[in-house]
């Protein structure tokens, strides 16, 4: 299996919780960390997470990202409208995005603008369909916090459509 380069966007409680198991994984390689908090910007991601330095400085936004990755994991907010610009920015850089944003699980009809923005960015980048199995393998298997969630929600399911596809 190819090692996937990963960007972790959002270094709050969930992002830092995901950071630690990523250090031990051989199937993912963390290449960048993004967080808008002045508390983290410019700091070494390892130090900011309470671990040993890793040599990856925390960047303030997707616009400042200088690397390309196979996938971005967004753990910023639960609000679809607030997450849309960040997700669209990462998609615009050609990276498929997996997010913990609950409101994006099914954004219709309450978050039509956010869904349209994200869909347009993914379509413009001509990204392939991203499967939920990435989220399951990365998050549900490794982060103790997520083990308390009902796995049947995402287990063995794949994201089977994009809003722009019929």
Image (cartoon, rainbow, N blue to C red):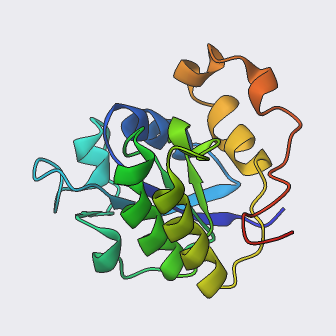
Q: Locate residue 100, reporting x and y percent.
A: 53, 40
Seen from the viewer's position, the closer of residues 22 and 126 is 126
Write down the quadrant of residue 166 in the picture. bottom right
As drawn, the residue found furthest toward the left would be: 38
Residue at horizontal 54 percent and vertical 77 percent from the top? 121
Seen from the viewer's position, the closer of residues 54 and 84 is 84
Taking the image as drawn, is residue 146 in sight?
yes
Name the quarter where the N terminus is drawn. Answer: bottom right
Q: Locate residue 138, reporting x and y percent.
A: 65, 43
Residue at horizontal 63 percent and vertical 56 percent from the top? 28
Q: Locate residue 111, reporting x and y percent.
A: 50, 49
Q: Is residue 154 left or right of residue 108?
A: right
Residue at horizontal 58 percent and vertical 42 percent from the top? 24
Q: Is residue 82 left or right of residue 42?
A: right
As drawn, the residue found furthest toward the top would be: 148
Residue at horizontal 44 percent and vertical 80 percent from the top? 67
Q: Locate residue 84, reporting x and y percent.
A: 43, 60
Total marks shown come to: 0
Write down the quadrant of residue 85 in the picture. bottom left
Relative to 156, is 36 above or below?
A: below
Taking the image as drawn, is residue 95 in sight?
no
Relative to 137, is 26 above or below?
A: below
């Amino acid at each position: 299996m190819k090692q996937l380069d990963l960007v972790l966007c959002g270094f709050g409680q969930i992002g830092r919780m995901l950071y630690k198991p990523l250090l031990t994984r051989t199937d993912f390689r963390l290449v960048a960390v993004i967080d808008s908090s002045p508390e983290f910007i410019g700091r070494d991601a390892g130090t900011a997470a309470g671990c040993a330095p890793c040599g990856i400085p925390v960047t303030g936004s997707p616009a400042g990202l200088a690397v390309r990755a196979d996938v971005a994991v967004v753990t910023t907010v639960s609000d679809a409208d607030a997450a849309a610009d960040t997700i669209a920015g990462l998609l615009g850089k050609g990276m498929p995005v997996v997010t913990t944003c609950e409101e994006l699980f099914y954004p219709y009809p309450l978050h039509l603008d956010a869904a349209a923005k994200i869909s347009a960015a993914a379509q413009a980048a001509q990204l392939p369909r991203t499967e939920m199995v990435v989220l399951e393998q990365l998050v549900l298997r490794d982060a103790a916090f997520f083990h308390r969630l009902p796995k049947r929600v995402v287990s063995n399911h794949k994201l089977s459509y994009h809003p722009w596809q019929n």
